[in-house]
Image (tube, rainbow, N blue to C red):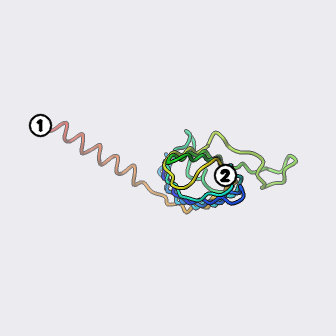
């Protein structure tokens, strides 16, 4: 789960955007990820910004935000939606050379919903994320501390 903030511009139906996400996965790993995107847009000219809440699938980790992928987004008025899937690298055994993207991992897709200003239309873009990871147990520690305090309050004699 996390937050994603970005700006987007479209010229001649080509969308360019960049976003910064801050996310924590179910393993307690936190990551900041900077993601530039380029792709096709339904709009000829547009520009704006967005802020969205991010959620992933059952096995999605912050590592899913790294590397190449595909993303589709839709903005209408103040509403902004997006779905992204990380790319899967070829092992070189087929027609696609080793290391090249030969598919997308839809089981580890990331879904986003939030607000936008100025952006409009639908986009299909290619993404290249680069993350800075921070190993942390802060969320688990905070949960245990809150749970312990609540237990003490409820069970006071």
Label 1 and label 2: CA atoms lie apart by: 65 Å
Q: Position of residue 142 (x, y in %)?
A: 34, 51
> In the picture, residue 20 is in which quadrant?
bottom right
Whether residue 128 is visible here, answered yes or no, is: no
According to the image, label 1 marks what residue?
157
Q: Secondary structure at mark 2?
A: loop
On screen, residue 34 versus residue 2, left or right, reads right
Say which mark, if any, is on residue 43: 2
Whether residue 114 is visible here, answered yes or no, is: yes
Residue at 55% from the left image edge and 52% from the top image edge: 62
On screen, residue 44 versus residue 139, left or right, reads right
Residue at 72% from the left image edge and 58% from the top image edge: 12
Which one is in front, 21 or 151? 21
Mark nearer the viewer, 1 or 2? 2
Q: Is residue 102 above or below residue 33?
A: above
Which one is in front, 103 or 94? 103
């Amino acid at each position: 789960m996390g937050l994603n903030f970005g700006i987007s511009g479209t010229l001649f139906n080509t969308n360019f955007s960049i976003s910064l996400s801050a996310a924590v996965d179910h393993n307690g790993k936190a990551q900041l990820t900077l993601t530039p995107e380029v792709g096709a847009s339904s709009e000829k000219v547009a520009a704006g910004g967005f802020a969205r809440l991010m959620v992933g699938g059952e096995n999605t980790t912050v590592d899913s935000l790294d590397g190449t992928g595909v993303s589709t987004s839709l903005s209408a008025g103040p509403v902004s939606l997006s779905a992204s899937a990380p790319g899967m690298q070829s092992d070189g055994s087929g027609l696609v050379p080793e290391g090249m993207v030969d598919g997308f991992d839809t089981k580890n897709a990331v879904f986003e919903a939030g607000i936008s200003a100025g952006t409009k239309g639908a986009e299909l873009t290619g993404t290249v994320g680069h993350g800075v990871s921070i190993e942390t147990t802060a969320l688990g520690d905070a949960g245990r501390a809150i749970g312990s305090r609540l237990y003490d309050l409820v069970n006071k004699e």
